């Protein structure tokens, strides 16, 4: 099957001149064979007719000579006559003389057996008597060979075949030269010009003064190439203009987004502020786009500080707008209520975000309205009292200590979305602070990140495993381990969502002069 396909491809790939020449050659050869066959048949028929007439003439001449010897029953004379006849005409294979009424010959010369290459001619032998009466005295039978017919036919056809072959070769040569000059060469130039246009050289043109079909085709190609060139130049000009315009728009948009990043960064607590209230900390803040829908929060209060992480609806510019709104609402609520009751802060933030976004009251049932909100975890820390109070809306708090890693689950309610039930209630979880405790809060962008061979999510179990392995390390080293694990898992896959994770250790009030764990690691 493969050989047949290769042969078919080879036949399709042959040049047009070869294909046309092959058709002409096969057609001319078929016509020549038919012509030679017809000529051979005609010549052979003519030769057979000539041989038959000659045999009739010879038989007529010999019957007069044989009449008297047969009448007188002179066998010797009859034999001499027929032997002499065979000697004079080599085409005669046998001569037989029969008396009337006898099936056996009176005299025979040669082998009278007939074959496919022979023909028989018979002539009655008559004798006119003195009384004027003509009597039949015998029959002369001549057996002629037809090999002479075939030989003469072949001799007569050889010049015809030679002339036919010469005419065929001459005709093919002339047709090939004319076909190549008149048709194939212009088509080859046209093909080359077409290939040049397909490669992008739209200036390809062909000169022609012909008015036949090739000339019309060439002129049509020139007009087509000119039209394509005009359209291409116009299109390229428009594309360049649009590209420059889009580049300018993109530059202005990116300038705006980059400036928005500066504005968003301004609401995030500075590292030196975090260092003032925490013994150690790390912040992993990785927006999916330039700006983020996540933010982390830190605020010092009279007897401690409030620290938290928020995951707002959306990412990019919409998410950044939500972070500004949520951050402003949270600051306003803390200003009015203080930080002692994180659960109450969550309830109030829920009401105020819904009111700020017009997602309460009648607007809550509006089908065309927005439905935006946030997940939020808050920790109120009192170092002097060795106390931490946590409340969370869908964002849990993980605690690593001497006994391992534990997780305090958040309430399964978000903030700010359109109310679909009773006013949410959140739970405060109070913890006694112990030395060597580390606290972690992260958004679902980290655990939901896809990666690995099967494209599954990073997952909470994998994150907890990484944290447990490095929980004794300084927090800057822990951040490196977590980032390396996440990057290795993610691979080349795009980031799905904004990622935020914060880890911190509290500086206990009664040990101001004691070396921190970070210092101990540096000494070690």
Image (cartoon, rainbow, N blue to C red):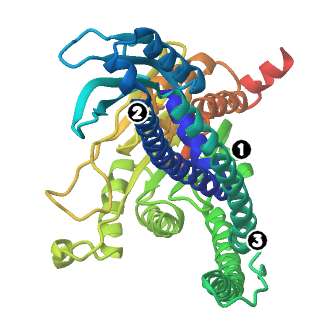
Residue position marked by numbered label 1 in the rendering = 275
Q: Nearer the viewer, residue 176 or 7?
A: 176
**Position in image of residue 420 (x %, y %):** 16, 60
Residue position marked by numbered label 2 in the rendering = 64
**Secondary structure of the residue carrying numbered label 2:** helix
**Secondary structure of the residue carrying numbered label 3:** helix
Q: Quadrant of the C terminus?
A: top right
- Circle 3 residues within 10 Å: few <14, some 14–19, many ≥20: few
Callout in the foreground (3, 1): 3
- Circle 2 residues within 10 Å: few <14, some 14–19, many ≥20: few
**Position in image of residue 443 (x %, y %):** 47, 44
Q: Nearer the viewer, residue 220 or 179?
A: 179
- Circle 1 residues within 10 Å: few <14, some 14–19, many ≥20: few
**Position in image of residue 296 (x %, y %):** 55, 52
Q: Which mark is residue 181?
A: 3
Callout in the foreground (2, 3): 2
Please identify the quarter of the rendering in which residue 362 is found.
Answer: bottom left
The residue depicted at 67 percent of the width and 58 percent of the height is 17
């Amino acid at each position: 099957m493969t050989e047949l396909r290769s042969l078919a491809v080879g036949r399709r790939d042959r040049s047009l001149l070869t294909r046309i020449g092959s058709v002409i050659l096969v057609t001319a050869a078929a016509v020549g064979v038919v012509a030679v066959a017809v000529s051979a048949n005609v010549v052979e028929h003519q030769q057979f007719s000539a041989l038959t007439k000659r045999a009739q003439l010879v038989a007529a001449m010999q019957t007069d000579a044989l009449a008297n010897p047969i009448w007188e029953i002179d066998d010797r004379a009859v034999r001499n006559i027929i032997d002499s006849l065979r000697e004079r005409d080599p085409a005669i294979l046998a001569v037989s003389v029969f008396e009337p009424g006898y099936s056996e010959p009176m005299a025979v010369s040669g082998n009278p057996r007939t074959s496919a290459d022979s023909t028989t001619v018979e002539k009655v032998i008559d004798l006119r008597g003195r009384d004027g009466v003509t009597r039949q005295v015998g029959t002369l039978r001549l057996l002629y060979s037809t090999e002479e017919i075939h030989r003469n036919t072949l001799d007569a056809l050889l010049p015809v075949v030679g002339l036919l072959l010469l005419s065929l070769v001459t005709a093919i040569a002339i047709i090939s030269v004319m076909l190549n000059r008149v048709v194939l060469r212009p088509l080859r130039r046209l093909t080359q010009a077409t290939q040049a246009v397909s490669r992008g050289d739209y200036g390809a043109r062909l000169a022609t003064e012909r008015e036949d079909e090739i000339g019309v085709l060439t002129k049509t190609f020139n007009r087509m190439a000119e039209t394509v060139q005009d359209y291409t130049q116009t299109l390229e000009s428009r594309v360049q203009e649009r590209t420059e315009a889009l580049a300018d728009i993109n530059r202005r948009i990116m300038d705006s987004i980059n400036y928005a990043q500066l504005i968003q960064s301004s609401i995030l607590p500075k590292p030196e502020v975090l260092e003032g209230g925490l013994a150690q900390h790390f912040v992993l803040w990785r927006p999916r786009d330039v700006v983020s829908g996540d933010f982390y929060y830190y605020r010092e209060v009279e007897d401690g500080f409030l620290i938290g992480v928020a995951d707002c609806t959306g990412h990019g510019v919409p998410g950044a707008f939500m972070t500004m709104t949520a951050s402003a609402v949270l600051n306003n609520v803390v200003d009015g209520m203080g930080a002692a009751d994180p659960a109450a802060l969550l309830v109030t933030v829920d009401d105020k975000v819904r009111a700020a976004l017009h997602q309460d009251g009648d607007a809550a049932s509006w089908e065309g309205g927005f439905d935006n909100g946030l997940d939020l975890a808050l920790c109120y820390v009192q170092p002097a009292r060795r106390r931490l109070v946590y409340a969370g809306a869908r964002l849990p708090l993980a605690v690593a200590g001497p006994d391992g890693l534990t997780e305090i689950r958040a309430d399964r309610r978000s903030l700010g979305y359109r109310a679909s039930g009773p006013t949410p209630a959140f739970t405060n979880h109070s913890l006694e602070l112990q030395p060597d405790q580390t606290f972690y809060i992260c958004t679902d962008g980290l655990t939901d990140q896809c990666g690995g061979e099967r494209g599954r999510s990073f997952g909470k179990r994998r994150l907890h495993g990484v944290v447990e392995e490095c929980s004794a390390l300084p927090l800057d080293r822990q951040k490196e381990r977590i980032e390396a694990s996440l990057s290795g898992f993610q691979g080349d896959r795009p980031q799905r969502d904004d990622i935020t994770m914060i880890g911190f250790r509290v500086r206990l009030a009664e040990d101001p002069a004691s070396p921190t764990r970070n210092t101990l690691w540096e000494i070690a």
